[in-house]
Image (cartoon, rainbow, N blue to C red):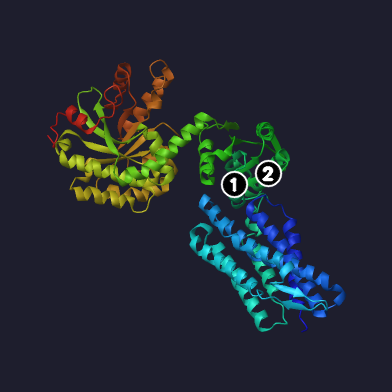
């Protein structure tokens, strides 16, 4: 029979070009890249030996019968490796691997071991094939077992891909299915037309599909800096964790990118990032530089000495200026160092820990180095535990509501109360509101907590209606996440309506920062509250950079002066005059004014002289539980 080798030759040339391009880009030392590179080598070798053995068996040269047998033996070994390589490659697509995954891989490697053993045994007993002295290729009794073996691995790859669909992702599953489909069609064509050798073409096309999709260079590099991107970083971290490798991490968070973009334009900002990338590469002198977000670079090091060298060089770099297009720019960054990052043992945990470290330093114009230590790790794990506990606390409604009274300046009357969420952890005890509220806002849980709190407040007031005759209103804090959440205002109104309580008894507190940053949205968001007669207060005035124009436009009836304004008021004339003038200006505009954070009698006396009528602070009362509040107001609890 005369064989058509055109398809095999085409596939060989195609894979050689593909290998050239793959090796001419920077490749990380991860399991997927390694397996893909090996897969290409095996594919090229398999097709090359397919061509050689086809020519030897077609021309049947007696003098080359021994060489023909050797070449066919090597080819059969390659036929064992191709399906097994596909199986191993498919296992590298799992985002995480467990001991159970490794055990499954080990067990399912047994057919490859058996098939390889059969090829070895064939050298003596000819169970798969033989070559006679005339150079004729003769099938052995177990010749078809190699097809069964290949079919078995195809079935295994397909079944495991279906079972792990959620872990490999829809795109990777689709690519694996396409690979198997292409191979199946090409094998079927060769089975029907024995002289047209298309199996090698199927292998070449399948590997090309992998290269253009899963192993596409553009998918793993940042389009601007040409560094590796977040996808590459996650693959590398998975490889390091799976191999239990020791490594250290340095994360660079650029602090002044927005400022550079605003002053010089986006194109200049891009040049700024590229310059930083180039300098980081020169410092590290290895390919392990990743740009994982618009403002964050991550560098991996694999020894303590390398880590310390890179860290020190980066500190020096980010305390210097650079010249770009004639402009002198100060490099500014928060550098986060994590020694022995393998101890975190989870890529998501590592990324979260980097976020946590980046938020630790105070706002500053200087570059800062934050290095992980036992204390920060302990604090991080505490925060993660609280974040995990929040889900249970929401599901089981474990939050409590405490109320801090707002007193008349004389301290003779409680005018209002501010509702404050409190949470107790079964192991850690009382959790600071600053901790769990910050975590809740970051994780998107704050709106659920706010609605739970509102239901508790409504229940408390409904059970103790005397509160409405004793107090003007109850104040409820609203975070940006609650205000900006679609439909949240309507949910709050529905809860109050279902409780049968007057809307006018509820006063919503919005912080100065929110009023300034989200002013355009607040006009719409507060409309529902205003229509139903609910009050609106500006909280923490003076803590930031409130736009007075915004304050005047929004329907605030009350302004709460932040406790930071009290600093130095007793011993500094300028601080005293500044506070007094603020109070005078706000009162002249018709606002009620509350002084927050009052702790000393001298402060009370001074504030009274300024015309302040309402005070909130530890001088009169800390936040109180429901029963303590009722005692203060001389109200008999409904349960009693």
At numbered mark 1, what does the secondary structure look like: helix, strand or loop? Answer: helix
Is 123 left, or right, of 497 in this rendering?
A: right
| Residue wearing tag 1 | 237
237 shown above or below 153: above
User: Which one is earlier in the sequence, the residue at label 2 or at label 1?
Assistant: 1
Residue named by callout 2: 277
Q: Could you say where residue 74 lies in the image, as x and y percent from the top left?
A: 75, 66
Residue at 32% x, 16% y: name it.
602
Between 312 and 303, the residue placed more toward the observer is: 303
Residue 14 can be seen, yes or no: no
Q: Position of residue 291 (x, y in %)?
A: 62, 47
- Is 455 rendered above or below residue 338? below
Does the image show residue 46? yes
Residue found 39% across the figure and 46% down from its top: 481
Dot 1, how many residues are within 10 Å of its Cα: few (below 14), some (14-19), or many (20+)?
A: many
Choose between 496 and 134: the one closer to the eye.
134
Specify the quadrant of the image occupied by residue 585.
Answer: top left
Dot 2 lies on which element?
helix
Extreme-front residue of the structure:
125
- Tags 2 and 1 touching, CB below 8 Å: no
Separation of marks 2 and 1 at Cα, in angstroms: 20 Å
Give the camera-side residue of 233 and 637.
233
Q: Position of residue 279 (x, y in %)?
A: 71, 40
In which quadrant is the N terminus drawn?
bottom right
In-front residue for pair 481/261 = 481
User: Which residue is outermost to the right?
Assistant: 63
Is 208 placed above or below 395 here?
below
The 10 Å Cα crowd at callout 2, few under 14, some 14 to 19, many 20 or more, is: many
Left/right of residue 614 with respect to residue 331 in the rendered view = left
């Amino acid at each position: 029979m005369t064989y058509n080798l055109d398809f095999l030759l085409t596939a060989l040339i195609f894979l050689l070009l593909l290998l050239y391009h793959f090796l001419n880009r920077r490749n990380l030392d991860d399991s997927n890249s390694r397996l893909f590179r090996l897969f290409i080598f095996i594919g090229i070798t398999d097709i090359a030996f397919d061509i050689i053995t086809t020519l030897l068996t077609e021309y049947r040269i007696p003098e080359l019968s021994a060489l023909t047998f050797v070449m066919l033996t090597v080819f059969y070994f390659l036929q064992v490796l191709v399906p097994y390589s596909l199986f191993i490659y498919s296992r590298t697509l799992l985002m995480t691997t467990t001991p159970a995954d490794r055990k499954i891989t080990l067990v399912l490697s047994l057919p490859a071991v058996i098939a390889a053993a059969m090829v070895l045994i064939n050298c003596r007993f000819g169970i798969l094939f033989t070559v006679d002295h005339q150079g004729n290729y003769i099938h052995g009794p177990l010749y078809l077992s190699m097809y069964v073996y290949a079919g078995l691995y195809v079935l295994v790859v397909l079944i495991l891909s279906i079972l792990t669909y959620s872990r490999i992702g829809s795109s990777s599953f689709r690519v694996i299915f396409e690979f198997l489909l292409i191979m199946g069609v090409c094998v079927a064509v060769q089975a029907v037309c024995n002289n047209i050798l298309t199996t090698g073409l199927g292998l070449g096309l399948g590997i090309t599909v992998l290269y253009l999709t899963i192993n596409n260079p553009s998918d793993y590099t940042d389009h601007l800096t040409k560094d590796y991107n977040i996808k590459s970083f996650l693959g590398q971290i998975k490889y390091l964790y799976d191999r239990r490798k020791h490594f250290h991490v340095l994360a660079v968070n650029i602090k002044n990118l927005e400022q550079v973009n605003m002053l010089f334009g986006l194109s200049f900002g891009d040049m700024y990032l590229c310059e930083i990338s180039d300098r980081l590469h020169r410092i590290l002198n290895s390919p392990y530089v990743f740009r994982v977000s618009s403002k964050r670079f991550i560098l991996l090091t694999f020894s303590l000495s390398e880590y310390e060298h890179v860290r020190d060089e980066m500190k020096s770099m980010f305390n210097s200026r650079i010249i770009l297009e004639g402009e002198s720019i100060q490099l500014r960054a928060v550098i986060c160092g994590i020694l022995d990052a393998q101890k975190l043992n989870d890529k998501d945990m590592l990324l979260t820990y980097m976020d946590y470290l980046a938020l630790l330093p105070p706002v500053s114009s200087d570059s800062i180095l934050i290095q992980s230590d036992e204390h920060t790790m302990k604090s991080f794990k505490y925060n993660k535990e609280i974040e995990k506990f929040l889900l249970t606390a929401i599901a089981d409604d474990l939050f409590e509501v405490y109320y801090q009274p707002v007193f008349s300046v004389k301290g003779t009357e409680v005018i209002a109360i501010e509702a404050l969420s409190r949470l107790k952890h079964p192991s850690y005890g009382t959790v600071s509101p600053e901790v769990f509220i910050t975590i809740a806002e970051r994780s998107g849980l704050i709106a659920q907590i706010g609605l739970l709190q509102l239901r508790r407040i409504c229940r408390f007031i409904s059970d103790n209606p005397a509160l409405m005759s004793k107090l003007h209103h109850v104040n409820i804090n609203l975070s940006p996440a609650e205000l900006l959440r679609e439909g949240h205002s309507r949910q709050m109104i529905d809860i109050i309506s279902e409780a049968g309580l007057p809307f006018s008894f509820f006063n919503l507190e919005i912080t100065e920062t929110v009023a300034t940053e989200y002013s355009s949205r607040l006009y719409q968001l507060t409309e529902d509250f205003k229509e139903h007669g609910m009050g609106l207060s500006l909280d923490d005035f003076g803590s930031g950079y409130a736009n007075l124009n915004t304050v005047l436009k929004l329907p605030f009836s009350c302004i709460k002066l932040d406790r930071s304004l009290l600093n130095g008021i007793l011993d500094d004339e300028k601080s005293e005059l500044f506070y007094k003038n603020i109070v005078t200006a706000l009162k002249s505009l018709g606002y009620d004014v509350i002084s927050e954070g009052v702790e000393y009698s001298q402060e009370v006396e001074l504030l009274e002289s300024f015309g302040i009528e309402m005070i909130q602070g530890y001088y009169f009362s800390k936040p109180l539980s429901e029963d303590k509040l009722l005692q203060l107001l001389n109200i008999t609890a409904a349960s009693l």
